[in-house]
Image: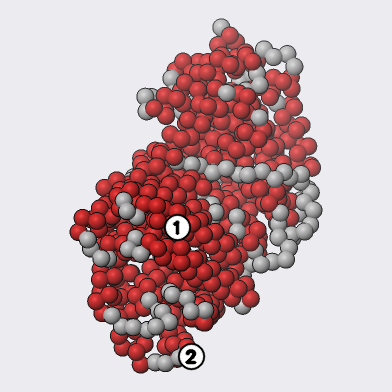
Amino acid sequence: MRIGLRETVFSANCFAAAMLALFVSFSLGLERPFWAMATVYITSQPLSGAVRSKAVFRLIGTIVGGSVAVLLVPALVDAPLLLSLALAGWVALCQFVSLLDRTPRSYVFMLAGYTAALIGFPSVTHPEMIFDTAILRVQEIGIGVLSAAIIHAVVWPRSVGQVFGARVRVVLGEAEQWIGDVLAPVPASGTARARRKLAGDITDLHVTATHIPFDTARLRPTRAVLTAMQDRLVLLIPLVSAIEDRWRQLREQTPMDVAAAVASVRGWVSDSALSAEPVLAELHAARTAADTTTWRDLLALNLLARLEELVLALGETRALAAAVAQPGSRPPVSVASVTRPLHRDYGLAALSAFATLLCVLGCCLFWIATGWPEGAVAAMIAAVVCCFFATLDDPVPAQRGFLIWTIASLPLAALYLFAILPAIDGFAMLTLAMAPPLLAMGAVMALPSWYGRMVPMLIGFAGGLALTNRFTVDAASFFNGNVAQVIGIAAAMMTTRLVRSIGAGTAIRRLRRAGWRDLAQLAERPVDTAAGQVTAWRSRMLDRVGLLASRIGEVEDEERDAAAATLRELRVGLSIAQIAPLADQAPLRSALARHFRDLARGDEATPSAELLAQIDEALAAGQAIADPAQRRDAMVNLVGLRRNVFPAANDWQDARAAA
């Protein structure tokens, strides 16, 4: 664990923002200033733009959640079961929507859910105060987020745009290194690992880019430029994977013109100062002169076509990366502002929401049945913990860590509450007394590997102190409240383990089934294969590749080829889109749709021999096309389809020519 200047400044900013939030809350006479202090640490991020986006989303979510609590509690306070069901249902609904969003904007929905629980459950004993409680909550959260946003934006702000630009250069360099390794004269090791890492990095770039509209920099890349650059990066992965497959088949016995073309592309990739025009001219000439008689001829033709696409795609990616690095400059590539869709798992989102509903309802029923005074604390903490970790395959380990570090904060909170705070007087002394633990925990929180441990400790510390304008020491309240908090976290863990937890292997299978359903739909409805629809489908598929890559290390060896298989399926979809306009390929598309429907249902593990025969017949029919350009285009697409669906099949032979 190494704490440097950046971590120190980040911690100092957090502490200054927390003290500012406390001072303003005390000055205004608000009821629970510790909410404002805790909000600062929950909102703070190393990137100033990310702080601002999270602050905006948190404030909006708090307002929405408070409004829902104001509507539900007075109307249902005389029917505790109905009120419990309404609040638990609202939390579950918001969690469901937030899991489908998968961008930082999802924070709005998550906050709207558990804020209603934080305000609503403690207010059931005093429903007449619900409006005042909600207003105070919104005010204190607002003070906290504004304090964090202002301090982090003024004191050594770290621009999201600058970090994003630097990250783009790194990712582009990784992509160029991977392409160079793929095109090497001798096979290079580690290309599969590089491919999986690049897929995950592209998804991370997409998430980071959502913070850029909130950045502190004066000039920022436009959304259209960001989207276009990510789309080009998305295109590179299936394209290079296809090239790797064809080059692996041809490397040992490569025609001279193809080998020269590969060497030219590799040289251009390694030196971005070189012009792409001579390379494109060489590829076009080789492709025009290519023969289409044998299977190796067809593989060479397919390789040349994909290399030509690669040069165009990488050239545009470089141009757009330069435009991102210099906001305000006009990109040399046409761009359109479109949304890049991500994978959505409706079933898992519904299961997570159902687990949250059961957990919160269970806490409420125990609270109602026993008349436990602190039952509201258990119910609202259970809602918070269920929402916090709902994006994980198995949230229980993270929830266990949250419980451990919450408990770890209690001795420190007790020391301050019962020994240190009674001995001090005035805000200046309070600031000095709070500095050592908050500065230390804030610096450690800046380290990514420690963030998940320090956040519950800081929340537990702030909640344990429960600083108000009238300082009182109540040992019974401290003990009962924290016991209820621990019970709420334990209830979330137990319910999640029983209902919601899945392993990485299950998550991988769900991702692949979703991809198969999309492929079946793509083959069944060629009207959806317009450029925009294919781009959206490709984005979802590549996002799944990134999600698979992040789980590969957690599964057994037999499941580790899932990412590579999904890339093949991504290339299948591109081939389907390319043959979709051809009316004579409708039977082949129907057979492909049936195959992927069977896979999605788990009915068939391997494609059928009949499907291979249909592809071979289409290849034979393509040989009869009179126009050379049309014949080459048709054969390129069908060769790619055959290699992707049947990578282990024997070489194709024209049965009519053999006869």
Quadrant containing the C terminus in the rendered view: top right
Q: Earlier in the sequence, mark 1 or mark 2?
A: 1
Quadrant in which the N terminus is drawn: bottom left
Measured as percent of width and height from the top left, residue 98 is found at 48, 50
Q: Quadrant of residue 254?
A: top right
Which residue does the numbered mark 2 point to in the structure image? 428
Q: Which residue is mark 1?
A: 70
Instruction: Work out whether 658 lies above or below 259.
Output: above
Residue 159 horizontal side relative to residue 487, left or right: right
Q: Is residue 585 above or below residue 179?
A: above
Residue 33 vs residue 522, the one in the foreground: 33
User: Foreground: 125 or 136?
Assistant: 125
Report helix, strand or loop for mark 2. helix
| Label 1 crowd bin: few (<14), some (14–19), many (20+), radius 10 Å | many
- From this viewpoint, which residue is outermost toward the top? 659
Q: In the image, what residue type sits under mark 1?
A: Val
In the rendered image of this protein, does residue 489 appear above or below residue 354?
A: below
Residue displayed at 48% across by 34% down = 515
Residue 285 rendering spot, x and y as whole percentages: 76, 31
Percent x, y for residue 223? 68, 51
Mark closer to the observer (1, 2): 1
Q: Hey, what amino acid is under mark 2?
A: Ala
Q: Mark yes or no: residue 202 visible.
A: yes
Q: Name the residue rendered at 72%, 43% in the picture.
A: 336
What kind of element bears circle 1? helix
* Residue in the picture at 46% in, 23% down: 595
Q: Can I make out residue 639 in this image?
A: no
